[in-house]
Amino acid sequence: MNDFSGALAFEPALRAFLLDEALPSAGIPAARFDEGLAAIIADLEPRRRALLAERRRLEAEIDEWHRTHPYDAEAYRSHLADIGYLRPEPPQVVPVTTAGVAEELRCAGPQLVVPVTNRRYALNAVNARWGSLYDALYGTDALRPAGPPAPWDRGRAAVVVAAVRELLDDVLPLAVGSHARARAYSVHGAELQVQLDDGTLTALRDPESFRGYRGDPRDPSLILLRRHDLHLELHIDRNGRLGGSDPAGVDDVRLESALSTIVDFEDSVAVVDGVDKADAYRVWLGLNRGDLRTTFVKDGRVVERALADDRTYRAPDGGVLVLPGRSHMLVRSVGIHMATDMVRADDAAIGESFLDVLITALCAVPRLRAAAAGGAAEPTGLTVVMPKLHGPDEVAFVVDLLARVERVLDLPERTLLLGLMDEERRTSANLPACIAAASSRIAFVNTGFLDRSGDEIHTSFEAGPVVRKTDLRSSTWMSAYERRNVAAALAAGMDRRAQIGKGMWAMPDRMNRMLAEKAAHPGSGATTAWVPSPTAATLHALHYLLIDPFAVHADLAGAGSPGLEELLSLALAPADAWTEDEIERELETNLQSILGYVVRWVDQGVGCSTVADLDGVGLMEDRATLRISSQHVANWLRHGVVDEDRVHEAMARMAALVDEQNAHDPGYRPMSPDLSGPAFRAAVELVATGATEPNGYTERVLHRHRREAKAAAATRGAHAGAAR
């Protein structure tokens, strides 16, 4: 029985945000909000703690088994079933019945993930629904032109134009001839007409691909086309930089790019107190109200950025066609393992996910009500992405939390949908049961290689030394994991009902490699995959123009799913499997990654960074990458591949390297030579406690040291003010 009294204490900054901004925007009385939050805590906090206790029990049981048994696949699987780690699969497939899933999640196209704490990035991501293909190809290494582009390189531009004409021939071919021979595009009746260089008049091979235009039909300024689920715009301006020399006057080609964006409160942010949290919620509120703005200096001038408007065209039948100008927004909460004292109940910390789900839904109320008032038969709901869930009981817990929040905010039932991250080993091993637990609310299921790898290492920590990080991607479990995710989603009927996703491309400056490799995601049946920037979204959209994941689904029908034997296989090697040089390289790679990320998180409050690796290649790092790197070093320590002295010596060297790599940053505080600051100590602690920290998560260590760094910065600021 719970004897919670209902007494809540808010950090002042968070309380002020609620009273002055969020609650008035939603028209929700403060008393109702407080009573609702208190009831959620009273009813669900004991259950949350019990679920976390179950995680700890399972960890201990598995660790002890590995310490006392030689590995045998059949015995191992039997043990996992005996202790309740593996749950019986539903006797029959439970079909997904979710209503209100946004069209963008039922189509196929790229998805962005953006930290909510950066206003400029958040606006860029939501506005990344449309992007210039010319700019994306010209400004990156996508076509491998020699050297970086000059301010204007006509030869490079010609290569881009030629490549885009080839693409148009591939995805939107003409009945006769090639787009490279086009001299004019015009609209005649309901048909797009193309004049070629020899005077021939032709049309699209598929006339239905023509969706609309702007301007005079005889000389339009824009042609709208569609392939699969994505639109393309041909911008025609015979006075433009490119259009002036283009025979058909095409000055740009814009693609519908990031169909959806996850606005992230979790792995890509550094939010540790009420001030941080209030500012994060404020950005989310502005995105939902549509009034978020920011200014910044670019090329010596002040630029203001706001949310894009919808796009309007003349349809072939003469009517008006309107397409969204913004990416569809989802929101990612922290996981249920996180506790916070930003709000205290009876002077005790509470589950932070209670705050995130309730307050992000509160901030979305104006948008949700506007959608409901629009007259749609199925108003679009808000998809809450819940990370780091372990198995079907935790999924059911989140489903109950979503229902409780709906009642507090007087939202219709099942307005809040669930984005299920299949990124923890126990969830991927029990995925059909997890989907069944949320069958009326699930809007997507998405793999996450990095967190899944971190959990893989931690779950099998006592079994032996893990293979090198680069070898994890070719592990048997990894292939089974990716294929099982698609198979389970399709078996539950998610085809065109909900989104089936894949993970992030982590090299934002390697677009040529992304174009070569990321086609595998739609080719495997995934209807979305994550990309690190708006430019990457535009380039990844090319994969969905060329490959139809829904056609792949038809090919996968009846193909079956990899068995649990493959999924539960361990990626281990003997401690003497590597040369000393290989061990040193792996150790330095991991430690440099840890330090490069942690120093910005702790000292500067930056939760997602592009960190140069040992070879100077920029890699996008967040808490998922930190988890795998810290777990890897801790595992090798545990099994004697390296010892503490070697780790500490390498960490000191890597700290000096990271300092050198960040020397250009005026706000950077070097870790060397004293190695006593909170960032360096946090990195050391992450490795030292890797074996004992629950599930190998990094948040508790990071939060404690970030709070220390913030307090120290405030003290320095106060002293500087007094000196002045």
Image (cartoon, rainbow, N blue to C red):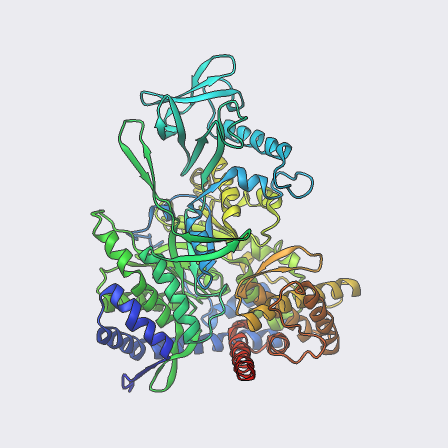
Give the camera-side residue of 690 and 298. Answer: 298
Q: Is residue 329 left or right of residue 86?
A: left
**Residue at image point 35% right, 60% down:** 286
**Residue at image point 58% right, 29% down:** 162
Please tell me whether residue 249 is drawn above or below residue 24 in the rendered image.
above
**Residue at image point 38% right, 56% down:** 330
Q: Is residue 286 left or right of residue 61?
A: left
Q: Is residue 433 visible?
A: no
Hey, which residue is sitting farthest top in the picture?
Answer: 199
Quarter of the picture containing the N terminus is bottom left
Please tell me whether residue 245 is drawn above or below residue 474 in the rendered image.
above
Q: Position of residue 316 (x, y in %)?
A: 31, 27
**Residue at image point 52% right, 66% down:** 607
Quarter of the picture containing the C terminus is bottom right
Give the camera-side residue of 705 and 90. Answer: 705
Q: Position of residue 711 (x, y in %)?
A: 52, 81
